Amino acid sequence: MEELPYKVEYAKTGRAKCRGCKINIEKDELRLAALVQSFFHDGKDCHWFHLNCFFQKHRPKAIDDIDHFEEIRIEDQENIRQKLDATKGILLPEPKGKKKGKKRAAEDSKTAAFNATALNDFGVEYAKSGRSACAGCGNNIMVNEVRIKKMDYTTEVGMKFGGQPFWHHVDCFAKIRGDYNFYLDGSDLPGFSELSPADKKIVKKAIKAIEITEAQAKKLKTEPRDKDEVEAENALEKLITEQTKLLFKVRDEIQFLKKSDLQNILFVNDSGMVSGSDALIERCSDFLTFGAIKKCKKCKNGDMIFAKYGYRCNGNIDEWTMCENFEEKPERVKCKIPKELKESKGNKKSEKNFFAKYKSLVKDRAVRPQIKKEIKKDEEDGKRIYKVEREREPLYGMHCVLISNNKGLKEELKTKITRLGGKVVTTLQEHIAFVISNNDEVEKMNKRMQEVKSLDIQVVDEKFIDAIEKLKRAEVIEKIKSMSICDWGSDPLTRIPAEEEKKTERESIYNRNKKKTAVMKLKNGTAIDPASGLSDVAHVYKDKLTNILYTTVLTKIDIQKNKNSYYKLQVLESDMERNYWLFRSWGRIGTDVGDNKTEKCFSVEEAITEFERLFEEKTGNIFGAPFQKKPNSYTLVEVDYENEDEKNKKKEELEKIPSKLPTSVQDLVKMIFDIDTMKKTMLEFELDLEKMPLGRLSSKQLHEAYTVLNDLDELIKSGDNNESKFIGFSNKFFSLVPHSFGMNKAPVINTVEMIKQKREMIDSLMEIEIAYAFIKDDEKSNTDVNPLDAHYAKLKTDLKPLDKNNDEFKLIESYIKNTHAETHNQYTLEIEDVFKVKRENEHRRYKPFKKLHNRQLLWHGSRLTNYVGILSHGLKIAPPEAPCTGYMFGKGVYFADMVSKSANYCCTSPRQPIGLMLLSEVALGDMYELTNAKYINKLPPGKHSCKGIGKTSPNPEQFQVREDGVTIPCGQPKTNDKLRSELLYNEYIVYDVAQVNIQYLLKLKFNYKRQ
């Protein structure tokens, strides 16, 4: 169950200060808290308030948002209800209709009082900068433009600081005012009197009071409800009131009992212990009032604890999964009373013994039904959905330069340009959209104008600004060219940045200062955390007898509690003297949330003792003993560190040695062995590079992750909808492969598509692991060889660049041009290099299939980071432990005869437009032809491959056949409208890697079209 945003209780001490009035909250006084994410640990802090102060800073949507509400006295529940109702309502003008005496006057007075309070959440003013984005349309609000505020209390900022202003264009606010229940006139907005007369008119015209009748007002304020429904709810509330009063009568009797006596009540009733004095009194009161509760039926070991709408289990199904079984009416038995309590003479606050005449009753505790919350799409995925379509300003995102001696004109133009979304700068650069000047300046051709010409930027005069005021942004581009007053100028589109997408991701205040990867100093084979401040004077302590290094990194992923935590521990020893420290740091993976502490210890024994105590506290394991994951505890992460400084020095020296490779091959090797590209790929997969650096990508660990995905796949296929099982496997997967989710909750892996994505991620990591192992192996080598030559040797592949005038090159060029599918029109392909490939021993492996009929030259595309593995080990078939999900025709090697079909698997982007593709000779033989998906474990007798037949394929009449009998399906696309097939294009699959002979490697540039 997710943590609720608010909490209520009676103050346990008198130490907490109210966040509103800053005065201490007295012991036993009712207090409310907003649960706010901490900057210092992976959890939430309670920001406590007095009852009255709370509602000045926060606006719970409903009672259901307040945890422990059902566990306070009934009169306090009613008080909170009234306060909450006072914050909810509709801002309405005075309804039309006749006056109806005192009752109507009282109603009008109540409406006026609510309006006065609720209006504090609204306001109107001039934008102080051009940075704020409109909550209605997503576009920026220009500086000095009128904007309207609506406070929001549900965001991270709103929860932490008691509200966050959401700004709107005037017309956007007018369109969505109903969402905010604002039906008043624009002149009622706070700040309206500060506007200029002209802007007052604009606001009043856009936001007119919506006058409604009294009947309409009542209908808006209250939803119509069925009579039986109201009567049933009243009866339930009456029962809850009676039971709550009885519960507190019992509670008042036992609250002064010793802690041991209360624990004894739970013990004799076969209940586990609960932490905290209040929780202990609450549970005992529940047992004594309604009867003792039996253990959880699901996990058999957990206790059913009261939780708002019923009882939830606090036990665990296994080491990865909490039980969380929920029952509205758990099974109860009579509550037993310890003999010593029955025979006692009362307590210090009461002369009579409550237990002497106590008789246990067994009955159900009445609870309010859980109201299912409607989760909006934007709340579900953490993205904003903009409800208003609004054209961006004509000059939005464009930079321009003013060249003029008229200071007054320059200021006037600057104001207009800013209002139209542009920005005036002084430095001439390549991205300047246009320059505003005049004919005299162009004719003078001074040094500054010469610079404008060298950059090929159009010059327009001041009339241009008035001419484009009502144009769309796209139309401005043409106007720059048509109104140019100079005889030069390149296409403005090449200088103007593409229109950026509106920000839909809700940026977290806990993610803003992205932590840079710290430079680790290696000493004694391991690194000291730089946060200790001791990396120059100390090293990690190593026991001389056992060779154990006292350092550890722990993680805890718990989807149910939204935890993605880390905890580091190190015992540090001074390099020079016998000084010792214990360093620890903690926080949330991939965010700024966290803190650290370095403590001086009197001796190494003291440091080790505390290190081992903390390790056992966090993991439930003895440090140094075989590790076993325990429920609700951290798990151990193995991290390999490298001495970056020494490694880089050696690399720099070796790079001075000339390479023996052709330049194009050098560039290719540099590209596929590029560590930065590997890291970017890992970041795309949301992996945490600090907890899972490149050096820790072990094949064993990744195969174990495959197994977990396979278990999830089998769970989906079996139709088992037990969410706990999906959560458990997901927790285990994310522990094996640490991810960075920021402040977002880790997703439960419970769909075929998610399993496919994670399987593809593991596929790529397996290939990265091969590449990185080669890099590390070359770094350890003592031979004086250029790193590129050393990497190339590891590929065991002969790569020869093809001359662009070569017939083979021209044939490949034609193959690309002819087989680019119409539906893949977001980019065009441009050949940068073609390499002839000869992998060591692959021709021998392929030799038996060379005699097979139907051999074709087909396309295969893959990520850049996969090519070290592909070239060194060949194309591979997924291992048995990998899930079957995502393979349309089973586990095999897939090819295409349409270049763009395979190009889509290169995972390029406008920012990373270079991709690699293969052309391989594939021995297809007799093909098992299919038009629908079918998972193939074994081909039918007499079949050598599978072909998924698509509606569109290269024209066979234009195929070419090489001298060795290999067919090149390089014809132009031809569509068969009569064919009933699930596939748009052909797919070819072989289930034996020996049927593949890689022949060409292509380096391609993906020219993405501007949207």
Image: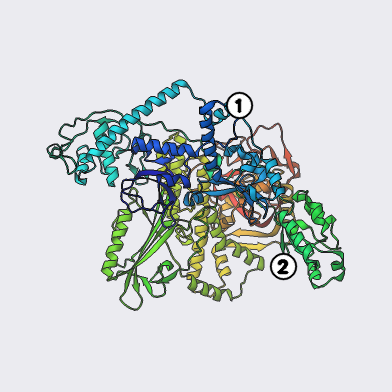
Viewer-side label of 2, 1: 1
Judging from the image, what secondary structure is the residue with disc 1 in?
loop
**Mark sitting earlier along the chain (2/1):** 1
Figure check: 231 above or below 953? above
Left/right of residue 391 with respect to residue 712 in the rendered view: right
| Residue in view at x 26 percent, y 68 percent | 605
Q: Mark 2 points at which residue?
A: 427
- Residue count near mark 1 (Cα–Cα under 10 Å), binned few <14, some 14–19, many ≥20: few
The spot of residue 805 in percent (x, y) is 76, 61
| Residue in view at x 30 percent, y 76 percent | 578
Q: Given the current orientation, which residue lies at the most extreme top position?
A: 228
Q: Which mark is residue 85?
A: none
Figure check: 514 above or below 341? below
Q: Which amino acid does label 1 sit on?
A: Gly
The spot of residue 911 in percent (x, y) is 64, 57
The spot of residue 1009 in percent (x, y) is 71, 51
Q: In which quarter of the image is residue 212?
A: top right
**Residue 851 is at least partly visible in this image:** no
